[in-house]
Image: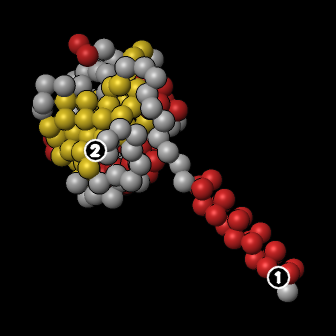
């Protein structure tokens, strides 16, 4: 009988510890924040919002692609965090992502785009961090060359630059 109780307690302890180990939290930024995400998210670090600095975004894992855009001559290489990865990390549950720029311009992006298209929150263009004067610090970019359907005005309008906030609805 004692053996069963001990085994049961050990199993319960392992179950609880496994749950604690998988429950991740978002650290606090150590540098100047460049992005705030709010709305229907499950992971936060400041008053119901997720606040990121550049190293925190980069730690999520960067990808790059080279594509032509309406904003630059020739092909450009963008490097950034896949929006799908960011949304997964924050346990986003909404159907729409609203991107707000530093000048309060907003663009609506369906979460279907995030899940089904190659779209990134770019931090770099051609290997250099993008300054505010050149669409930075964050620019939502689709891989227009490898997704012919995205190479249309509808998707150009969803490519918000100088992104400061994302709101999940």
Name the quadrant containing residue 134. Answer: top left
Question: In which quarter of the view is residue 119 placed?
Answer: top left
Residue 46 lies, in percent from the top left, at: 35, 38
Q: Residue furthest bottom?
A: 1
Q: Crowding at label 2, few (<14), some or many (≥20) Cα neighbours within 10 Å?
A: many
The x and y percentages for residue 85 are 45, 46
Q: Which residue is mark 2?
A: 38
Classify mark 1: residues with Cα within 10 Å, few (<14), some (14-19) or many (20+): few
The correct choice, above or below, for 9 with respect to 42 in the image is below
Which corner quadrant holds the C terminus? Answer: bottom left
Query: Does residue 151 appear anywhere in the picture?
Result: no
| Residue under the point 21% across and 44% down | 98
Q: Quadrant of residue 77?
A: top left
Q: Residue at x 12, y 32 (%)?
A: 105
Q: What residue sits right under mark 1 in the picture?
A: 4
Of circles 1 and 2, the one toward us is: 1
* Vertical order, 141 against 102 (above or below): below
Report if the CB atoms under discs 1 and 2 are less than 8 Å apart.
Answer: no
**Which residue is more in the foreground, 69 or 97?**
97
Sequence-wise, the earlier of marks 1 and 2 is 1
């Amino acid at each position: 009988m004692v053996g069963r109780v001990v085994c049961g307690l050990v199993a319960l302890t392992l179950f609880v510890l496994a749950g604690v180990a998988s429950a991740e939290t978002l650290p606090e930024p150590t540098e100047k924040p460049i992005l705030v995400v709010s709305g229907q998210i499950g992971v936060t670090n400041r008053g119901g919002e997720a606040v990121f600095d550049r190293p925190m975004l980069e730690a999520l894992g960067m990808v790059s692609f080279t594509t032509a855009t309406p904003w630059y001559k020739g092909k450009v290489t963008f490097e950034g965090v896949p929006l799908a990865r960011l949304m997964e990390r924050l346990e986003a549950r909404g159907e729409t992502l609203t991107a707000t720029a530093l000048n309060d311009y907003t663009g609506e992006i369906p979460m279907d785009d995030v899940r089904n298209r190659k779209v990134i929150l770019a931090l770099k263009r051609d290997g250099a961090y993008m300054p505010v004067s050149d669409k930075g610090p964050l620019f939502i970019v689709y891989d227009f060359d490898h997704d012919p359907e995205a190479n249309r005005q509808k998707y150009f309008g969803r490519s918000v630059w100088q992104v400061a906030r994302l709101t999940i609805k």
